[in-house]
Image (cartoon, rainbow, N blue to C red):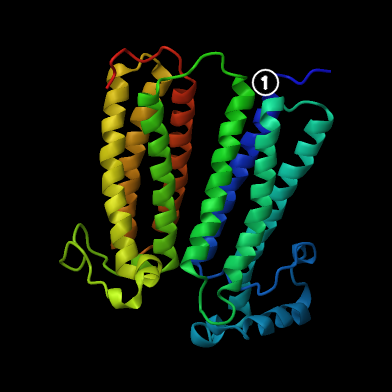
């Protein structure tokens, strides 16, 4: 039995996984914004599925939480009832991660057995499996950083955790599109269109990582004016702390870099959308490019709103969801341009 060249059922599976990843990113954002990420101090991949039952088990979990710095330095007056509130967010986050792992592994094994996965996509699905395994390890590595010497998780580890989730999202979307469309028979658009499309997608990804650094450092709680930063274009930075500390832990610097990258990204996506609208003959690509530019400006506005509202939880979550949507549309645009054949006018740039 020959393997198919395309498979709508495999595509549907991967799109479902992508939707679940969007969901877990949002639950993770709520977990962070509610300060819930360190409420579970152990990693139990199997037994951790069952939450505490009864007063004795809840008291045991609360006692474990009391032993970490976050409780003594931040939440010393927390009651058991309040602890349950933060515990459920982290438990839901971990449970959803386990569900995603099963939704990826079990159907993949089944589709392999049924010879439903196109041969050229088997290795890509294998990469998705590896990314899921790595994500679980990085998630615990992130939590572990906040259990002894810190009252929160290390920002660079939070950035790594989100980065892997977004990379997994992009892999699922791209592979799903490949499974749905089948193998390309053309050469696709020229390099002068592919290169900026991939660069744009990469910059959106990097900007999301910078946003994670801002979140991990609580940098949205300082310099809450815009467009200046406490009346200055750039914040004061103490470079004597060392390059690593400045780049990954200085609140002013990480927010400043996030702002600058946003400005550059807005210029890039706007100019690229104009060029695509003028030179592309494919209506879908035109709409994706223009839509991406509109979403980029909306996301920037949400970023400013997040800042001036001192990271109101609903605005902050909307900003995080906006970042995910922008990345999804940038991925769709890059894929369609990579597959496009003779839909751009000659001498396009």
Occupied quadrant, residue 115: top right
Q: Looking at the picture, how far across and down is residue 217, in whole percent?
A: 41, 69
Residue at 61% x, 19% y is 183
Q: Is residue 194 above or below residue 327?
A: above
Point out the image quarter for the C terminus: top left
The quadrant holding residue 144 is bottom right
Residue at left 28%, top 60%?
256
Label 1 Cα crowd, 10 Å radius (few <14 / some 14-19 / many 20+): many
Element under disc 1: loop
Q: Nearer the viewer, residue 195 or 102?
A: 195
Q: Which residue is denoted by mark 1 in the rendering? A: 6
What residue is rendered at 52% in x and 60% in y?
30
Q: Considering only vertical position in the picture, is 164 above or below 126?
A: below
Which quadrant is home to the N terminus? Answer: top right
How many numbered discs, if any?
1
Give the vertical position of 305 relative to 145 (above or below): above
User: Which percent across, then down, holds residue 319?
Assistant: 40, 52
Name the residue rendered at 22%, 63% in the picture: 225
Q: Quick one: 99 or 252, which is closer to the camera?
A: 252
Residue 9 locus on image (x, y percent): 71, 27
Q: Quadrant of residue 202?
A: top left
Q: Is residue 92 visible?
A: no
Residue 204 visible in rendering: yes
- Viewer-proximal residue among 29 and 171: 171
Q: In the image as oriented, which residue stretches furthest toward the left?
A: 231
């Amino acid at each position: 039995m020959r393997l198919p060249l395309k498979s709508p059922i495999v595509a549907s599976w991967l799109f479902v996984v992508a939707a679940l990843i969007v969901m877990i990113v949002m639950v993770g954002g709520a977990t962070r914004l509610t300060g819930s990420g360190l409420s579970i101090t152990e990693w139990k991949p199997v037994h951790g599925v069952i939450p505490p039952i009864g007063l004795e088990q809840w008291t045991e979990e609360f006692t474990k939480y009391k032993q970490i710095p976050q409780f003594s330095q931040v939440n010393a007056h927390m009651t058991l009832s309040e602890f349950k509130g933060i515990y459920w967010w982290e438990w839901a986050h971990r449970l959803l991660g386990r569900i995603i792992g099963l939704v990826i592994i079990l159907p993949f094994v089944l589709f392999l057995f049924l010879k439903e996965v196109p041969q050229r996509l088997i290795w890509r699905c294998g990469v998705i499996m590896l990314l899921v395994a790595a994500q679980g390890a990085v998630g615990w590595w992130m939590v572990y950083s906040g259990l002894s010497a810190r009252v929160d998780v290390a920002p660079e580890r939070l950035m790594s955790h989100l980065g892997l989730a977004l990379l997994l999202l992009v892999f699922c979307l791209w592979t799903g599109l490949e499974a749905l469309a089948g193998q390309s028979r053309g050469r696709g658009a020229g390099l002068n269109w592919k290169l900026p499309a991939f660069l744009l997608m990469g910059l959106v990804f990097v900007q999301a990582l910078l946003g994670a650094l801002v979140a991990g450092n609580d940098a949205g709680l300082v310099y809450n004016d815009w467009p200046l930063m406490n009346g200055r274009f750039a914040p004061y930075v103490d470079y004597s702390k060392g390059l690593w500390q400045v780049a990954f832990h200085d609140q002013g610097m990480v927010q400043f870099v996030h702002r600058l990258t946003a400005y550059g990204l807005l210029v890039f996506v706007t100019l690229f959308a104009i060029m695509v609208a003028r030179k592309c003959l494919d209506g879908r690509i035109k709409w994706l490019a223009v839509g991406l530019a509109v979403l980029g400006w909306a996301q920037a506005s949400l970023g400013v709103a997040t800042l001036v509202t001192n990271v109101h939880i609903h605005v902050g979550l909307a900003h995080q969801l906006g970042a995910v949507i922008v990345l999804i549309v940038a991925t769709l645009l890059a894929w369609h341009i990579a597959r496009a054949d003779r839909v751009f006018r000659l001498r396009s740039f």
